[in-house]
C-alpha cells in the first residue's frame, strides 16, 4: 500500500509581526576548492533564519558565454512540515567573504517572495556571483586553506502564515474590558481579571515554579488557555509536548487545540495521522469540527481530496 500523499494547502492566515525573528545570516564553507570540477553542485545542510528553513546550493559552472567558469549560489525555502502554510517577503543578499572586509562581494537577489510550495526544483539565485578564477586566486583574498566562505543575509519583511502565534501585548496599568479586579501594590493599581478558576491557576503556577511539571488530560486545556492569556510560551510548549506524547486526548480535540493556540508541531502530527478518508470523515462529523477555523477546514478538505485521488488507479 502506498503512503498517503502529503497535504497541499493554499489558504493563508493574517500577516504576522516577526518581531525579533526578522533577520539571520547563513554561513557556508566551500572546501577543497582546487578539486571542484566544472559542473559540480554542492548541497549544504538546511539552516534556519527568520524562523524558516533554508536550503542553499553552490555550484561551479561554465555559463556558456566564453567567460570561463563562475561560482553561482542558489536558495529555496524548505517546507518541512505538512501542516504549515506560509509566505514570506524578504531580501536576500549573497556574499563571498574576503579577508579584507571592504572587498567582500555582495549581490542582492531580485526575487524576494518564498512560500510553502517551494522546493529544490524552485531554487533561485545568482548564477554569476563571481568568476571562478577570481575566487580561486589566493592573491584576491577570497580563498584560504583551499576554502571559500559564502554567506547569505536574509531579512524577512513580512509573513503570511498559520504556524506562528501572535505577539500578545497587555497593559496591566490601564482599565480594559478584560479587567474586572483592581490590585493595589505599593500605591500602584493593576487591572486584572478574576475570571480564572483557582484550581486551574494553581496548576499553572505549579508548572511555572516547577513544583509539578506533569500535565494531565484534566489540566492541559485550562493550562493552555491561561498560558495563552498571559503569553507564557514555555508553558505552552510544555503543554504541547504533553499532547504530542500522550493519547488520552482525541485526535479531533488535538486538532482544535493546535488550531486555537498555534501549536505547529501538534498540528503537523495530527495532519500526518489523518491517513485515510474515513478518519477525516469522522473528524468532520465531530462537535469540535464546528469550532475549527476556516483555514483548518480547507486543509482537511484538501487532505480528504488528496487521499481519495490517491486510491484512483
Image: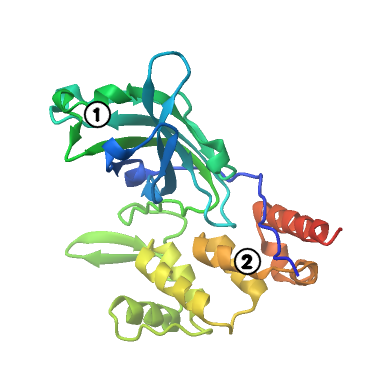
In the image shown, does 240 or 117 lie closer to the viewer? 117
302, 225: nearer the viewer = 302
Q: Taking the image as drawn, is residue 263 in sight?
A: no
- The kind of secondary structure element at disc 2 is helix
Identify residue for label 2: 272
- On screen, residue 56 versus residue 120, left or right, reads left
Residue at horizontal 59 percent and vertical 57 percent from the top: 82
Residue at the image position 18 percent from the left and 29 percent from the top: 98
Residue 71, position as x, y percentages in the image: 36, 28
Q: Give the percent coordinates (x, y) of residue 132.
A: 31, 25
Dot 2 alpha-carbon crowd within 10 angstroms: few under 14, some 14 to 19, many 20 or more: some
Q: Residues within 10 Å of mark 1 (few under 14, many from 20)?
A: some
Which corner quadrant holds the C terminus? bottom right
Q: What is the distance, in whole Å, between disc 1 and disc 2 at their CAs?
A: 47 Å
Residue placed under numbered mark 1 in the picture: 136
Q: Residue at x 44, y 45 (%)?
A: 55
Image quarter where the N terminus lies is bottom right
In what element is the residue under mark 1? loop
Question: Vertical placement of 206 versus 18: above or below?
Answer: below
Horizontally, is 154 left or right of 298 in the view? left
Q: Earlier in the sequence, mark 1 or mark 2?
A: 1
Regarding residue 287, the answer to whether it shows in the image is yes
What's the mark number on residue 96? none
Amino acid at each position: 500500500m502506498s503512503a498517503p500523499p502529503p497535504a497541499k494547502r493554499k489558504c493563508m492566515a493574517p500577516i504576522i509581526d516577526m518581531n525579533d525573528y526578522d533577520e539571520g545570516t547563513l554561513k557556508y564553507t566551500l572546501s577543497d576548492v582546487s578539486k571542484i570540477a566544472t559542473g559540480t553542485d554542492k548541497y549544504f545542510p538546511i539552516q534556519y533564519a527568520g524562523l524558516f528553513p533554508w536550503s542553499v546550493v553552490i555550484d561551479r559552472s561554465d555559463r556558456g558565454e566564453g567567460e570561463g567558469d563562475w561560482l553561482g549560489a542558489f536558495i529555496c525555502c524548505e517546507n518541512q512540515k505538512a501542516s504549515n502554510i506560509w509566505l514570506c517577503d524578504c531580501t536576500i543578499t549573497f556574499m563571498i567573504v574576503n579577508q579584507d572586509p571592504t572587498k567582500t562581494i555582495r549581490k542582492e537577489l531580485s526575487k524576494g517572495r518564498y512560500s510553502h510550495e517551494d522546493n529544490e526544483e524552485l531554487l533561485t539565485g545568482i548564477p554569476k556571483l563571481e568568476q571562478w578564477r577570481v575566487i580561486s586566486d589566493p592573491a584576491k583574498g577570497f580563498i584560504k586553506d583551499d576554502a571559500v566562505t559564502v554567506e547569505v543575509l536574509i531579512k524577512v519583511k513580512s509573513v503570511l502564515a498559520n504556524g506562528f502565534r501572535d505577539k500578545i501585548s497587555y497593559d496591566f496599568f490601564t482599565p480594559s474590558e478584560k479587567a474586572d479586579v483592581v490590585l493595589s501594590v505599593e500605591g500602584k493599581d493593576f487591572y486584572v481579571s478574576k475570571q480564572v478558576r483557582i484550581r486551574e491557576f494553581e496548576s499553572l503556577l505549579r508548572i511555572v515554579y516547577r513544583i509539578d511539571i506533569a500535565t494531565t488530560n484534566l489540566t492541559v486545556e485550562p493550562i493552555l488557555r491561561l498560558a495563552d492569556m498571559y503569553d507564557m510560551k514555555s508553558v505552552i510548549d510544555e503543554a504541547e509536548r504533553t499532547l504530542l506524547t500522550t493519547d488520552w486526548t482525541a485526535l479531533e480535540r488535538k486538532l482544535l487545540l493546535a488550531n486555537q493556540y498555534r501549536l505547529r508541531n501538534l498540528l503537523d502530527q495530527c495532519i500526518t495521522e489523518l491517513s485515510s478518508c474515513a478518519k477525516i470523515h469522522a473528524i468532520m462529523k465531530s462537535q469540535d469540527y464546528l469550532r475549527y477555523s476556516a483555514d483548518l477546514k480547507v486543509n482537511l478538505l484538501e487532505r480528504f481530496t488528496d487521499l481519495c485521488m490517491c486510491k484512483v488507479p
